[in-house]
Image (cartoon, rainbow, N blue to C red):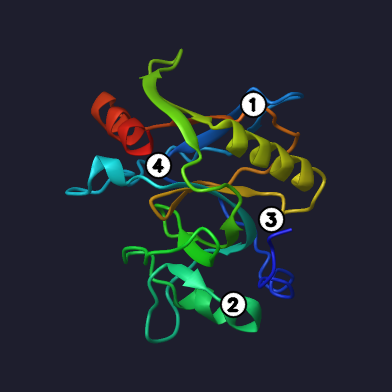
Amino acid sequence: MRSRGWVGVTVVLILAVLVAGIGAAAFVGGESGDSDGPDTGTTPTPVLTPGESAASGVFQLRQVFFQESGQVQGEPPMRPGPTDGGKDAGRELQRVDCTLKPRPMKDSDNVILCDAFGFRYGLGPSELLANPVASAEAGQATSDEWVVTVQLTDDATAEFTDLTQRLVGVGPPLNQVAVVINGVVVTAPAVQETITTGLLQISGPLNEQEAAALALSLS
């Protein structure tokens, strides 16, 4: 299991927070059912910031070890990004300034990242290999909202199946999987069933241009 570094920290900082993000990401077409994160209905920050290349999208799935919201505490503030975890992870979480651009990170790093509304998450390493996306397509859902449907590669689908199987029945927040795009937590739904299809859907509010840019960035 890839959770080394956060052991001993999760017990201290298991706080209930509203799961919010850039939009909502749903795991689609699980063998026994789907797992969704709630939607706050608040207009989020775009996935791609002005001037950012559409080809720079980085898609990751990371297990949630703890999460917290609140104002920045302590000085100096930290940018979101890699962290060693361990006994100092709680203080590091408090210092993270979600208004700052995330630092570069490796798939193997433990990280503290934010969603678009300033909620902070302590996350483990990426559970997927590099370049896990087989395809990403923008389209309109039945409700006429624009969505981006992501299909993982065969290898990434196998890894995702193993991850969801491992987390079924685990207590919160350890049963949550953070969907991370470009260093921002989109959402962190709880895993309720083993999911075998490797199919995810990222929903709005996105307009046609934003959905197309996001799909292009992940392709």
Name the residue: 58% across, 47% down: 128
Which label sits on residue 42? 4
Residue type at numbered disc 1: Thr
- How busy is the neighbourhood of tag 2: few (under 14 within 10 Å), some, or many (20 plus)? some
Crowding at dot 1, Cα within 10 Å, few <14 / some 14-19 / many 20+, comes out as: some
Which residue of the protein is positioned furthest toward the left in this rendering?
A: 51
Farthest residue to the bottom: give it.
75
Given the image, on which type of amino acid does mark 2 rest?
Gly
Dot 3 falls on a residue whose secondary structure is loop
Q: CA distance from mark 3 to mark 1?
A: 23 Å
At which x and y percent is residue 165?
77, 40
Q: Is residue 20 in sight in this rendering?
A: no
**Residue 173 image label:** 3
Asked if labels 1 and 3 touch by Cβ distance under 8 angstroms, the answer is no
> Circle 3: is it few (<14), some (14-19), or many (20+) Cα within 10 Å?
many
Quarter of the rendering containing residue 54? top left
Q: Position of residue 106 (x, y in %)?
A: 47, 62
Query: What amino acid type should be assigned to the residue bearing mark 3?
Result: Pro
Amino acid type indicated by mark 4: Thr
Which one is earlier in the sequence, the residue at label 4 or at label 1?
Answer: 4
The foreground one among 73 and 112 is 112
Disc 4 from disc 1: Cα separation:
29 Å
Q: Nearer the viewer, mark 4 or mark 2?
A: 2
Which sits earlier in the primary sequence, circle 3 or circle 2?
2
Picture quarter with the N terminus: bottom right
Seen in the picture, residue 73 relative to 43 is either above or below; the reply is below
Q: What whole-number distance in Å separates the C-alpha atoms at marks 3 and 2? A: 15 Å
Q: Secondary structure at mark 2?
A: helix
Q: Which residue is mark 2?
A: 90
Task: Name the residue tied to disc 1.
Answer: 197
